Amino acid sequence: MKEVLQAGASHGHLNIVKFMVNHALEKKYTHVYGARNEPDALTHAILGQHNIIVEFLLQIVGEVSWNIAKPDDVAASRHDESLAEKLYGIYPGTVRTGDLLVKLARRGYDQALKYAYTSGHDNVESTNAAFMAAAKWGSIDVLKFLLSTSRISSEVFDAVLKEAAGSMI
C-alpha cells in the first residue's frame, strides 16, 4: 500500500494519492505512511515537482505524521524557499518533542539545516544542540557549516571533542 501511494505521488497521480490516503484514514492504517518510512510520499511528490500533491499531503499533517526532515532537505536542495519554510513551520505539529534543526543535523541534511539557519531559525541553544547531534552521528558537512557560524559555544565544542576522544580509546 505504501508503494502505491509513493508511486502515485512520484508520478503526479492525485486521484490515486487521495484514494490511498482516504482508504488509510478509513481503515486506520495511516501509520504505514508516516514518519518512519523514508522516503515517503511527500518526498516523492516534492522530487517530482507535483505541487498539488504536496499541498494535499500537507493538509493531512495531523492525520499522517510525515517525516518532515527529508522533504525539507529536498525542498532546500531545490531552492524552494517557500516550501522549505512551510515544512519547517509544520514540523512542531508532527512530533511530540524535538527540534528540527537537531533532527536535520543528526540525519546529515545539510541543505535544509543551512536554509533553516540562514532563514532565522538560529537560536544559540538549537545551534549548539544541532552541533552536538551532528558530531555524535558523524554529519561532517553539518559540522563544518555550524562551525563556520561562530555560534558554537566553547563549552559545547570542548564537550564534543572530549566525547570524540573518548570514543577513539
Image (tube, grey):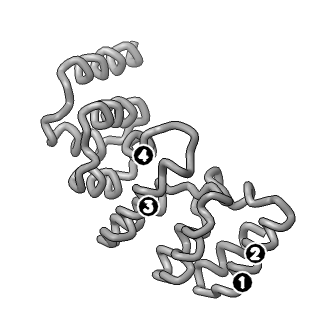
Q: Earlier in the sequence, mark 1 or mark 4?
A: 1
Q: Residue at x 64, y 85 (%)?
A: 14
For mark 4, give the secondary structure. helix
Q: Which mark is residue 168?
A: none
Residue 104: x percent and y percent?
41, 47
Residue 100: x percent and y percent?
42, 46
Task: Name the residue tied to disc 2.
Answer: 20
Task: Name the residue tied to disc 1.
Answer: 16
Query: Does 80 sit above or below residue 48?
Result: above
Q: Earlier in the sequence, mark 3 or mark 2?
A: 2
The answer to which quarter of the image holds residue 59 is bottom right
Q: Decide if residue 135 is on the left or right side of residue 149.
A: right
Q: CA distance from mark 3 to mark 4?
A: 10 Å
Q: Residues within 10 Å of mark 2 (few under 14, many from 20)?
A: many
Task: Name the residue tied to disc 4.
Answer: 100
The answer to which quarter of the image holds residue 53 is bottom right
Q: Residue at x 25, y 43 (%)?
A: 122
Residue type of the residue flagged with mark 4: Leu
**Between tags 1 and 3, which lies in front?**
3
Q: CA distance from mark 2 to mark 4?
A: 28 Å
Residue type of the residue flagged with mark 3: Leu
Q: Are marks 1 and 2 in contact (CB under 8 Å)?
A: yes
Q: Earlier in the sequence, mark 3 or mark 4?
A: 3
Residue 28: x percent and y percent?
82, 59
Q: Decide if residue 120 is on the left or right side of residue 16.
A: left
Q: Quadrant of the C terminus?
A: top left
For mark 3, give the secondary structure. helix
Query: Does 91 sit above or below residue 33?
Result: above
